[in-house]
Amino acid sequence: MKIVKPMLLGYQEKVSSEEGWIYEPKYDGIRLLVGNNFSYTRHGTITTNRFPELLFPGLEVLLDGELITPGTVAPDDFEGVMSRFSGNKEQEVIFMAFDIIAYKNEPTTSHPLDERKGILTEALSNIDSPYINLVPYIYTEGEAVFNLMKENKMEGIVAKRLGTPYLIGKRSDNWRKSINWSYHECIVSKVTYEPLTVQLNSVEGDYLGSVRIGFTKEVKEELFSRTPPYNCKVKARGWTSTGKLRIPLIISIG
């Protein structure tokens, strides 16, 4: 088994609807590459024994996708997939395939995206596993797909430019993610340094989580020049099951 680094996403803040692009749901799980009798994460961690239901002997193929667990509030549940990753074998998993890197022992990366989607569909029909599904996609209507993701409390969408190859191990503007952020008014209750960490509370005083990444130059200047408590605006990827903000980022202070 040769470890292949997957193609990475660019970022697009404002969602658009463009000709020559397709739009897919962005699932909230673990990026996984799945082959004939193996699987591993985007960082190269071997997960074959953790997810035996993803093994399918007899077909030389390498799939790229997202490992998810079914949720109750949304179609996917990040905490569930992390529970399974940590050893909870009772937790159901589903692999959502969105691309194909090799098929019948031949690389497919040079094929344009539209052709790879066709090859992927054929490969999945041959695998015929209840644990491996195709990520749906739609042409042009990015804003409509994003609104649907918001309604279903999903993470966002991925826009992909038609006619483009799969770029192993590279981040490309041909793939762009847009995140379904939630926005919050919070209180900076404590700031610690090395590393910079900001504790967030609600206006009622409840602890909402801590910010450790994503500080802009302007936000850092404000943090270094003030003494808590004070107001801030935060965006996050929704809430955890324990009522904390998930991956919060500070937008502005005051």
Image (cartoon, helix red, strand yellow):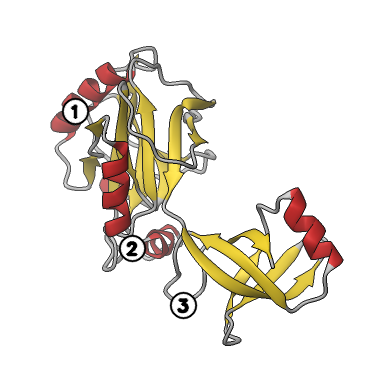
Residue 88, given in percent of the width and then of the height, sits at 38, 66
* Circle 2 SS class: loop
Are the residues tagged 2 and 3 within 8 Å (C-beta)? no
Disc 1 designates what residue? 121
Image quarter of the N terminus? top left
The residue depicted at 43 percent of the width and 57 percent of the height is: 85
Disc 2 designates what residue? 89
* Horizontal side of residue 111 vs 12, given as left or right: left
Q: Quadrant of residue 93?
A: bottom left
- Density class for disc 3 (Cα within 10 Å; few <14, some 14-19, many ≥20) is few
Residue 131, given in percent of the width and then of the height, sits at 22, 47
- Density class for disc 2 (Cα within 10 Å; few <14, some 14-19, many ≥20) is few
Residue 242 has which mark?
3
User: Which of the two discs, 1 and 2, labels the residue nearer the N terminus?
Assistant: 2
Are the residues tagged 1 and 2 within 8 Å (C-beta)? no
Residue at the extreme right: 225
Residue sitting nearer the eye, 87 or 139 = 139
Residue 172, given in percent of the width and then of the height, sits at 51, 26
The residue depicted at 67 percent of the width and 73 percent of the height is: 231
Q: Is residue 98 above or below residue 83?
A: above
Q: Amino acid at mark 1?
A: Thr
The residue depicted at 78 percent of the width and 64 percent of the height is: 223
